Image (cartoon, grey):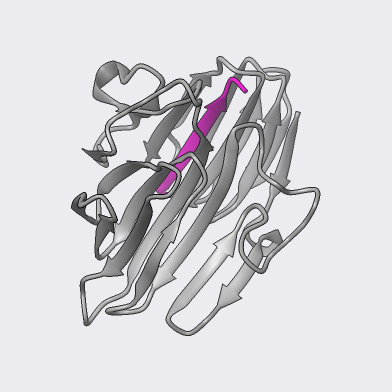
Amino acid sequence: MMKPRTAQQCGQADYGWLQARYTFSFGHYFDPKLLGYASLRVLNQEVLAPGAALQPRTYPRVDILNLILQGEAEYRDSEGNYCRASAGDALLLATQPGVTWSEQNVNRDAPLTRIQLWLDACPQRENPVVQQLPLALNQPYQLLASPDGENSSLQVRQQVWIHHITLEPGQEWHQPLQGSRAWLQSIHGQFQAMSANGEREALGCGDGAFICDETSIRLKAQTPLRALIVDLMS
């Protein structure tokens, strides 16, 4: 089964200094039917104005994955950890109860654009607080995150595999799935998504789709495409 959730259906926010699109319930946007999907709690696409900052706050026990699409950000926690990430970077933060994190757009002249995912973290797992990885934008496929850090991917505290797909028009990618559920997200571009049983959906820039009880998914790009496949075991 595939069920699209278009960019237009998502929650919207415009605070001037922050513009956001919320796939699931977040902040002021609440839908009791959209409280996440399996262990994927949050998927936000956000733009921070030049110099804008998110003030220190605590988080539930989650892994926060930031994909920087434009600009440069710095992150600080109350334990003294600090890092910077620029366009083309993937940054994974392993949050802990009682520890605050802040985020700053360090560029005073340009916005910061990023996609952020939250994944529930298993209480028995302890991973490095900060992990960083360059996105392989010149390759059709990259394993971005996995439970064991295989193939030099980021290591998450959950049975989740995140696949980063980059295709040119006309190219296809076939991705086997390990879990019973998955989330498909277009970062940019238009494409056809095809399930193993022949179901087909047309998706555009910023669109997503729930995937349930499928053994694989196939993508065929109609325009230059970047997409994520979040394979969810639980």
Viewport quadrant of the N terminus? top right
Residue 21, horizontal then vertical, whole percent: 57, 64
Q: Nearer the viewer, residue 186 or 113?
A: 113
Residue 41, horizontal then vertical, whole percent: 59, 43
Question: In the rendered image, is residue 221 in sight?
Answer: no
Instruction: Say which residue appears at 27% left-offset and 79% top-offset.
Output: 51
- Total numbered labels: 0
Instruction: Say which residue appears at 73% left-offset and 61% top-offset.
Output: 30
Dividing the picture into quarters, in which one does residue 38 lie?
top right
231 part of magenta stretch? yes
Farthest bottom residue in view: 16
- Magenta extent: 224-234
Residue 87, horizontal then vertical, whole percent: 25, 56
185 versus 23 height, above or below: above
Instruction: Say which residue appears at 80% left-offset and 48% top-offset.
Output: 33
Farthest right residue in view: 33
Residue 220, horizontal then vertical, whole percent: 52, 35
116 versus 153 height, above or below: below
Q: Nearer the viewer, residue 177 or 79?
A: 79
Question: In the rendered image, is residue 233 in sight?
Answer: yes
Residue 81 lies left or right of residue 16; in this view the side is left
Dividing the picture into quarters, in which one does residue 11 lie?
bottom right
